[in-house]
Amino acid sequence: MEDIITTSALPGQFSDNTLTLRQPDDWHVHLRDGDMLKLAADYTARQFARAIVMPNLVPPITTVSAAAAYRGRIMAALSEERAFTPLMTAYLTDEINPDEIEAGFLDGVFTACKLYPANATTNSAAGVTDVRRIWSTLERMQKIDMPLLVHGEVVSPDIDIFDREAVFLETVLGPVLKDFPALRVVLEHITTEDSVQFVEAAGSNLAATITAHHLRIDRNAMFDGGLRPHAYCLPVAKRRHHRAALRKAAVSGSPKFFLGTDSAPHPKHEKESACGCAGIFSAPVALESYAQTFEEEGALDRLEGFASEFGPRFYRLPLNEGSVTLHRVAQDVPDLMTCGDIDIVPFHAGQSLGWRFVEEGSQGET
Ligand SMILES: NC(=O)N[C@@H](CC(=O)O)C(=O)O
Ligand SMILES: [Zn+2]
Ligand SMILES: [Zn+2]
């Protein structure tokens, strides 16, 4: 049995232990492919109407036809009752052709381009080795008003991993914004106070996504009584004061900060390894996790803007018409999820959350 937690008055759309929000979107997610796609896509489509789908497959999505085919596989993996729109992205490489990018954007296949500095993160080996190599593509994107999404870390081994995001702002993002002042850019999964300040100081063409996990963990989570591979993601979680800055930005009501889970499932054995891979699978409890954070910050009334309004406004897409409901009941998150033969450890595994997403058509009490 679940405990119904009674509470005094809370702001916003909260009443009777129920929080109702305009249906949100996820502006950064990894749905994977093959055996894992069904599970990943279903969890995301359960909570979100649309999602910006990352192109870091192997091989990466660099052409219009590959993106259209991947979109088809995503839709085929979903059951019919899931009304979901995957928004596809193009993976930028040194050799990317601006004509291919423009054709995909004008066809409505590509919503945005993704810049991975080569070797910065999972499946980024084919990424960009020097941002100057894609200058003509950035020029074209600015011209056609196509958003650039950025994994903002430098890769130099001389730079401490905890400093890689801050150095990227100075050495890469600053110059890009200076040369392309009208380019719309999303600095994705920000992890530092430096990024919060950088985004706040920039024009309205720069926004940032914030993950559920970076709002909850700091770098100590990776070393809590031993090595904790399930708290490892990139950019790596930073010191506690950075987490505080992210929380402040997320609940600030500024339209420059919006929801992007960066839910990134990996098989358990690949995370629990001598060289464990980066990524946290938050999709199963994404909204619950954000709601918990916003509640702790006394800002439940700000969740709807962050989750459902600021993203579409930045992307110039209509707001969703539907709504979702969260119940304020305890939810025990399982230790493990299985997808065929693959075991995956979700974010918040083994923990109890104070919220539960209510499936449409159910009472949420199952
Ligand atoms: N965030 C991660 O730690 N991993 C992501 C890649 C990324 O978003 O950088 C993945 O694809 O696994
Ligand atoms: Zn990334
Ligand atoms: Zn990601």
Image (cartoon, helix red, strand yellow):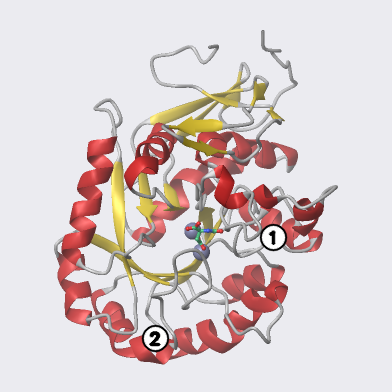
Tell how many labels. Answer: 2
- Per the image, the residue denoted by label 2 is 180
User: Please, which residue is most extreme toward the right here?
Assistant: 225
How packed mark 1 is, by other alpha carbons closer than 10 Å (few <14, some 14-19, many 20 or more), is: many
State the image coordinates of residue 55 (x, y, percent, origin top left): 35, 61
State the image coordinates of residue 313 (x, y, percent, origin top left): 39, 56
Q: Taking the image as drawn, is residue 280 in sight?
A: no
Q: Residue at x 60, y 70 (%)?
A: 200
Residue situated in front as seen by the camera: 47 or 269: 269
Element at label 2: loop
Question: Is there a contact, CB below 8 Å, between mark 2 and mark 1?
Answer: no
Q: Which mark is residue 237?
A: 1
Q: Is residue 271 above or below residue 286?
A: below
The image quarter in which residue 61 lies: bottom left
Which amino acid does the dot numbered 2 rest on? Phe
State the image coordinates of residue 178 (x, y, percent, origin top left): 47, 89
